[in-house]
Amino acid sequence: MNIKNKMKISDILEETYTALLSNKARTSLTILGIVIGIASVIAMISIGAGAQGTIESNIKSIGSNLITISPGAQRGLGLQVSSGRGSARTLTEADGYSIKEEIDNVNAVSPELSGRYQVVAKGTNTNTSVIGVIDTYPTVRNLEIEEGSFITSQHLRNYSKVAVIGPTVSSDLFGEDINAIGKIIRIKNIQFTVIGVTKAKGGSGFSNPDDMIFVPIGSAQRFLAGETYVSSISVQASDSESMTQVQQDITTLLLDRHNISVPEMADFSIFNQADILATASSITDTFTILLGSVAGISLVVGGIGIMNMMLTTVTERTREIGLRKAIGAKEKDINLQFLIEAVMLTFIGGLIGVFLGWLISFGVTYFDILQTKVTIKSILLAFTISASIGIIFGYYPARRAAKLNPIEALRYE
Amino acid sequence: MIEIKNVTKIYKTGSVEFKALNGVSFKIEDGEFVAIMGPSGSGKSTLMHILGALDTPSSGMYFLDGRDVSSMSDEQLADIRRDKIGFVFQSFNLLPRTTVLRNVMLPLVYAGVKEEEREKQARSALEAAGLNESHFVHKSNELSGGQIQRVAIARALVNNPSLILADEPTGNLDSKTGEIVLGTFKRLNKELGRTVILITHEHDVAEHADRIIHIRDGIIIEDSREHKK
């Protein structure tokens, strides 16, 4: 008889199952604590990952491997009174062309001159951004044409009064589903002919590419702004590895061209898309950690709930434990039984929690609030946490049960 | 066979010592039906705990089937309880909301008996304890007191123990049901040859046994076989 004196795991599971079912209300409330904890961890992490993805793709939609040069000093040593970025007049179209010619690993350069004007077309009018650009703009800024064509070098040479408009502008001025090609619009009272409509990009914020009008940069300088400067130069590096080199070379070149010997006195500033991406993702990372730790706290609270219930259970079932010991249960049998009970609670809670968390994140995506991602990693993380919570918070009550003296336990009222 | 040799048990509360048993010795042969009788505080519960391998004596020896139980570890005591002893308690101690069969099978679970074997043994134990088969699938809280105590007896029987220890088994039953339960013990002793030890403070109950050991203040004051009218 001594050879096979081990309790099988299936027996322990059956004992656990019976015990948990015998107090359904308490069992489900305890599980609920874990469900909420796990579900919020899953949902929060997926929302964090989703936010990160959304922000990254938004930044990338501006263009890839993008370096932007703006006029005005960024590192002015506090000597200058800062006049908002882009308002200083230090960059010229020629700066742009020389970057293209003299620096390696530059794919395309796009000098831009932006302004905000009242635009009128046959009685309707709108106030929007008008940007003077050259033919490389679509390449640099990932812009696609829906109808018609973009501005060509021909238009640039001739200072043509032609415009390419964004879909939002098109519907604002001409209404939905009306072909705007060939129509006349008046910008600052000067007539431009629409030659193309860009594809909707779906952006938002300060520079919505769908709500813009593009005109040849020469025309913008001559007819609209009345000056020969540009408000920014966008440079596309050939690949992400060469970004740093391109950025350094541009700095050197422009300092030289502007006759500035001290880099701190530069009259322009350079933004690197990778820097923006890195900043943005570090912000979202922080955010994810914040959300995750809030969710983690609720998980710990759930774990304490389990410990509380297990301690109550041990007290309530003192006589049962005494009986089990009297009929031959060993300390480790009792220990295992109660530990498995706690782990079972967290396991069931974890399972429901993962499902609920996935449902929440699915809902967030479905209702277009944010594109969320539930990763296998976060599910595994949640499961590991919930199993360890079961073991950690179940350990003490189980030990207490196992250590009970059978005589006292049997007498317990 | 049970042999108790000069057993003492001392409880300490702080600096105060209390001698619950003071040099108790007796022998019980296999197949005897013995009542251990005494008022509360006499040491009969302490004696029962030692006989049931729930506790060890402070000094003295306890041999059960030739093995010295008095110096065993907790682990070994659990093995002895599992293999050699069946308990019947005053307050029944069945698992609530659990079927009769599962209750009776519980000792076999800890003994590691195969599942198919368990139910067979449980059924024959229940039949031996005199419970009607129609009650086997009932939950323990759906039964009457007498039925519950017979389930408890079946549970004590199921592991085929050398010794059945009944601690005030009729204490929570009315006298008529009590008679039936005592009859069950008698039958187990006479027909199946089980060794039964009955612990009680009631003379009426003790009289059902063939031998009565009277205990008072931790010592045996009488060990009689000729009490029968």
Image (cartoon, rainbow, N blue to C red):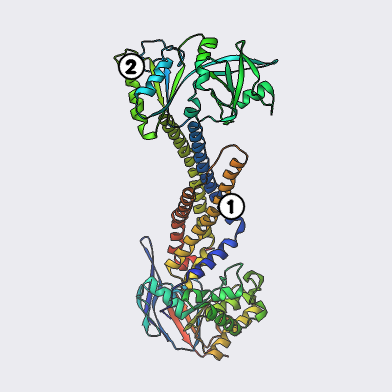
Q: Residue A313 bears which disc, if any?
A: none
Q: Amino acid at mark 1?
A: Leu
Please name which of the two marks, 2 or 1, marks the residue nearer to the observer.
Answer: 2
Placement of A9 over or under A215, stated as above or below: below
Q: Amino acid at mark 2?
A: Leu
Chain of the residue displaying label 1: A
Tell me if I can see residue B4 in this picture. Answer: yes
Tell me if I can see residue B218 in this picture. Answer: no
Q: Residue at x 37, y 14 (%)?
A: A267
| Residue A228 placement (x, y as % from top left) | 46, 11
Task: Say which element carries label 1.
Answer: helix
Same chain for the residues under marks 2 and 1 in the image = yes
- Residue farthest along the left direction in this orientation: A261
Residue to which mark 1 is pinned: A29
Task: Say which element carries label 2.
Answer: helix
Q: Describe residue B174's horizontal placement relative to residue B166 as left or right.
A: right
The foreground one among A98 and A113 is: A98
Q: Residue A255 bears which disc, if any?
A: 2
**Mark count:** 2
Chain of the residue displaying label 2: A
Placement of A141 over or under A53, stated as above or below: above
| Residue B139 placement (x, y as % from top left) | 63, 71
The foreground one among B51 and B151 is: B151
